[in-house]
Image (cartoon, rainbow, N blue to C red):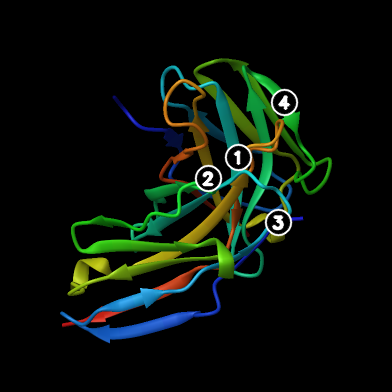
Amino acid sequence: AQKVTQAQTEISVVEKEDVTLDCVYETRDTTYYLFWYKQPPSGELVFLIRRNSFDEQNEISGRYSWNFQKSTSSFNFTITASQVVDSAVYFCALTSSMGSARQLTFGSGTQLTVLP
Amino acid sequence: DAGVIQSPRHEVTEMGQEVTLRCKPISGHDYLFWYRQTMMRGLELLIYFNNNVPIDDSGMPEDRFSAKMPNASFSTLKIQPSEPRDSAVYFCASSSLRGPKNIQYFGAGTRLSVL
């Protein structure tokens, strides 16, 4: 069985602060994919990043960066110099590439509020 | 290219009524997923299709729920009869083996309220 844990239910920061959202996953598969999605107040789910289990390189995209560590089964997401527009619920998700198992297993989400 | 399109965005109905949610996946995508989001259970997969064929419907809560995909560009999720506990946001997502694999792109969702 697969499981994604986002222990932080809510985080509140002041604009320009850095913030890290934690994600811990469980899977027995050796090949899998990890994702982050953003759900702004408007409600849609926006894809942010995908990482496969063979690629442990950290990734930076503008103010966003992701730290994938297989040794601790973690895939953490950092927003640098946060902005009010970053306020949203962020979901970490996991899928296996084995067979037809293509469903995404989502964490419970972290509500990020960036205060002006 | 247009994203996943869901309709309606909001649906308010009375208990016992039939509800039909619609989804148009991204053109060329061969996987289509229906998810439900509630406060209590979070995001959960209901059913997914590959090339219009249902592959896994183990997440469909009960027989009142049914989903169809008559062609590659259209899918429906039907609830009959609806109950107040069906109130949730229903998302449709699609993905393709041809592009970056396993990336699911979501529609804006349908917020269903059953009174």
x then y, percent, for residue A2 = 70, 56
Q: Residue at x 61, y 51 (%)?
A: B36
Q: CA distance from mark 3 to mark 4?
A: 22 Å
**Is residue B6 shown above or below B54?**
below
Amino acid type indicated by mark 2: Phe
Q: Which mark is residue B54?
A: 4
Q: CA distance from mark 4 to mark 2?
A: 17 Å
Tag 1 and tag 2, C-beta contact below 8 Å: yes
Q: Nearer the viewer, mark 3 or mark 1?
A: 3
Amino acid type indicated by mark 4: Pro
Amino acid type indicated by mark 3: Gln
Q: CA distance from mark 3 to mark 2?
A: 21 Å
Q: Which residue is mark 3?
A: A2
Q: Nearer the viewer, mark 4 or mark 2?
A: 4
Q: Which residue is mark 2?
A: B91
Q: Classify mark 4: helix, strand or loop.
A: strand
Numbered disc 1: what chain? B
How many C-alpha atoms fall within 10 Å of the one at disc 1: few (<14), some, or many (≥20)?
A: many
Q: From the viewer's perspective, is B56 left or right of B101? A: right
Q: How many marks?
A: 4
Q: Classify mark 1: helix, strand or loop.
A: strand
Q: CA distance from mark 1 to mark 4?
A: 11 Å
Numbered disc 2: what chain? B
Amino acid type indicated by mark 1: Trp
- Disc 4 or 2, which lies upstream in sequence? 4
Tag 3 and tag 4, C-beta contact below 8 Å: no
List the single residue furthest toward the top: B71
Q: Which residue is mark 1?
A: B34
Of residues B100 and A85, the one nearer the viewer is: B100
